Amino acid sequence: MPALTTLEKLEILADAAKYDASCASSGTAKRNSTGGKGIGSTEGMGICHAYAPDGRCISLLKILLTNHCVFDCHYCVNRKSSNVRRARFTPQEVADLTIAFYKRNYIEGLFLSSGIVKSSSHTMEQLVETARILREEYDFRGYIHLKTIPEAEAELVHRAGLYADRVSINVELPTDAGLTRLAPDKNARQIEGAMGRTKSDIVEAKDAKKRFKHAPRFAPAGQSTQMIVGADGASDADIVGKASRLYDRFGLRRVYYSAFSPIPDASAVLPLKRPPLIREHRLYQSDWLMRFYGFQPAEVMQAAEPDGMLPLDIDPKLAWALKFREQFPVDVNRASREQLLRVPGLGVKAVNRIIASRRHRTLRLDDVAKLTVSIARVRPFLCALDWRPVMLTDRADLRSMLAPRAEQLELFAA
Amino acid sequence: MSALRQPATDAHYCVELERPDDFDAWRTAARALVQARVPPDAVSWREPGGVGDLFAAGGCALPAPPPAAAPARASKRFLDLARHAALHRDPQRFALLYRLLWRLQAKPGIMEDKADADIAAVENLAKAVRRDSHKMHAFVRFREVAPGDEPEAGPHYVAWFEPEHHILRANAGFFVRRFANMRWSILTPAGALHWDGEVLEEGPPALRSDAPCGDPTEDLWRTYYASIFNPARLKVGAMLKEMPRKYWKNMPEAALIPELVAGAQRREAQMVAAGALDFAERPQTLDSLAQAIHACRNCPIGTLENRAVAGEGPHGAPLMIVGEQPGDQEDEAGRPFVGPAGQLLDRHLERAGIDRRAAYVTNAVKHFKFVQRGKRRLHQSPTAKEIDTCRWWLESERALVRPRLVLALGASAARGVLGRTVSIARERGRPIGLEDGSELWITAHPSYLLRLEGAAQEQQARLFDADLAAVQARLAELAG
């Protein structure tokens, strides 16, 4: 077989990486290339350099070092028994590609992952080597996200954190039974053990940084993980519960949800039909409720139907509000911040603006309209100086009034 | 209070700004006007290229503030917002900012009142400018130009960009910090920036034709863009919201979008069709299962010249024996384990005291896979995917028979039960717990013994017997 060109390898290895959801490049330490030899900067906010037609942001060069793999995880397109074309980059090739893309302002940095070749430790070593070339030889100061391999030696995983802004380990499936069934070579305890070690490394490095100015940084953008939704029988309640335990135990920055999508040469064990994409969206919304809106995991689960699934036609906050109507309407001029955050249709920004504004005037419905996206949506749950929803909050058909109408528009005439 | 609001004079003032993004000049003038108590409707602001004002016939010198005038007051929040809003291309922006500054003198807390119309207007301007800056950071695309006459200077990277507002100068710092050690230029219709690694210079307005028209690396980038896109998740609206069409013409990857979108639904349909497995409801009896497997065409083996061989044995058998697949003779007879390997298996089972008739005997793959060589049909091992596909039938059998112990003969059988490939040498001789509470024992396939000779065969036969004896002991234990 003739050797593959860089273009062909890139095609194979980027294609193999697209099932990873994360492309975030935000929240790391600020730095830039002045005074250095190379290029690169991070200024807190991540930048999306392009958007693909799947609506996802392209911020990083997201590729695998190789898609050869000795593991046989059923949901994965790169599993050993899958019949896909295989390719392999050297660490030097990936580093050069990253720099070439970065110089043209295509990307914020690199998100590197890999299939397992030879051994877990060998693979981890190659990942770390790529980051080392970028940081030490090219003095690259952009963003690096490394996937770490839980089965690899702890020392190698630790070195990854010294070069990378973010490290991640995928828990893959929300339940241990699902993992055993679909990823027979992986082990839930090993994954959580590695997450625990990374957490303590991060905490330790932060602590050292407080006392010693030159203490090395360790993954300043923290660690994250990913769960596949819809490949096993886990309900939304299971997933929300798992995510909140992960946030608590390992101090994760983010849990990503990836709706299982049909992969070429799929394993026969998998469901063939993809879960509706909206399910993934509802899970992200519930994640937001826990992280920014003061909802407890148990409260999010209250929004779910008896079978543990979040409703697909309305968002979980509205679902919760419809179940607990006795908590509404709330008075925009008097209610606490926590109460306002519970109002469907009011985001964190709108609540901040309401609280700042009501110091200067007693808000009327028109004033609230200026501060929110859709007054029609929030009106049934609010009282203002000149507004009381009276019967609206108690109407039985409130749900159908607020649920977005089903529509099938041709968004793109191509 | 009202005295303070009185205009100091009834003259009309006109302030000319040299550049459309000159916030500092606006600030100096606005400060002086506030101190001289010139009300907002007595000032007009002009930028280069802007239209004249009806009332401002001639340029007026700014009024000198009274000597004891209090300094103009502006909160930090106002300055942050105004600095951005001043870059908007709206010609009314300076007047709006001055009106707000004027009101701020009487009510310093007004900035918090988000429901105020002026505040909302300024916030909207600032938001649009911030978004434009952010999109500039994101969508500028440099193209490499070979160094030419001074090769030691290294390549030069040049970009063409069309910002919506007057943001070029304000964003120079971002690009300098990011590409400090690179030679680059950003050309726009309103001006240009040039960085040589040490000094930033400004240039006159440029034309698109001044920028290079291509870069070989763009092929790699387009390949990446097309490959990272997942056609199973088309969401064009979400893309357009963040990357509106107006930016597309200067982004090399955007040319691919219509083609990717058009191909996406087609590609997904193909992907699903290629992997489509037509499994109906699980059969409720062993007989209906035996019927159903004949019709199975979920893998290529089912389409060969062969017939399906169902398992045989009693319902509720405590032991299930799983082989690899039917062979030539099994296919002829329509029964499992009747060929040479089956006969060898029978002898060993008898020696171990296991009654084959009390066990349920079946295969991981239900059809015979072979290649025709003349008159002979040569056995071919099933692939992992074929075993996984057929696993659905084996699972159905296990669910109906409910054996307490499953004995897998060979690696294919073990994969059929476990869904993963294991090493026989490592796993033989001990139980592996299964999800339904039964246990799996793994040993070699009898056809392996048939292929060996001499001492190796004797040794493997001993191991095989030992495995069967252990299974028999465990069965007795489970029964007792």
Image (cartoon, coloured by chain):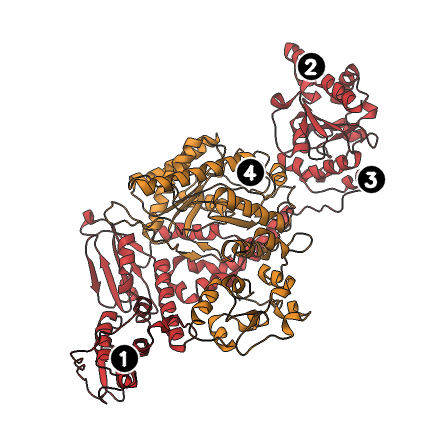
Chain colours: A orange, B red
Q: Quadrant of the N terminus of chain B?
A: bottom left
Tell me the quarter of the picture where residue B358 sits: top right
Q: Do marks 1 and 2 share a subunit?
A: yes
| Neighbour tally class for label 4: few under 14, some 14-19, many 20 plus, Cα within 10 Å | many
**Image marks 1 and 2: residues in contact by CB distance under 8 Å:** no
Q: Earlier in the sequence, mark 1 or mark 2?
A: 1
What residue is disc 4 on?
A79
What residue is disc 3 on?
B285
Q: Tell me the element at label 2.
A: helix
Q: Tell me the element at label 4.
A: loop
- The residues tagged by marks 4 and 1 sit, at their Cα atoms, a distance apart of 64 Å
Residue A85 lies, in percent from the top left, at: 51, 40
* Residue furthest out toward the top: B455
Q: Do marks 3 and 1 share a subunit?
A: yes
* 1 vs 2, front mark: 1
Q: Quadrant of the C terminus of chain B?
A: top right
Please report, as a chain letter, where disc 4 is located: A
**Image marks 4 and 2: residues in contact by CB distance under 8 Å:** no
Q: Amino acid at mark 2?
A: Ala
Q: Do marks 2 and 3 share a subunit?
A: yes
Q: Do marks 3 and 4 share a subunit?
A: no
What residue is disc 2 on?
B461
- The residues tagged by marks 2 and 3 sit, at their Cα atoms, a distance apart of 36 Å
Q: Tell me the element at label 1.
A: loop
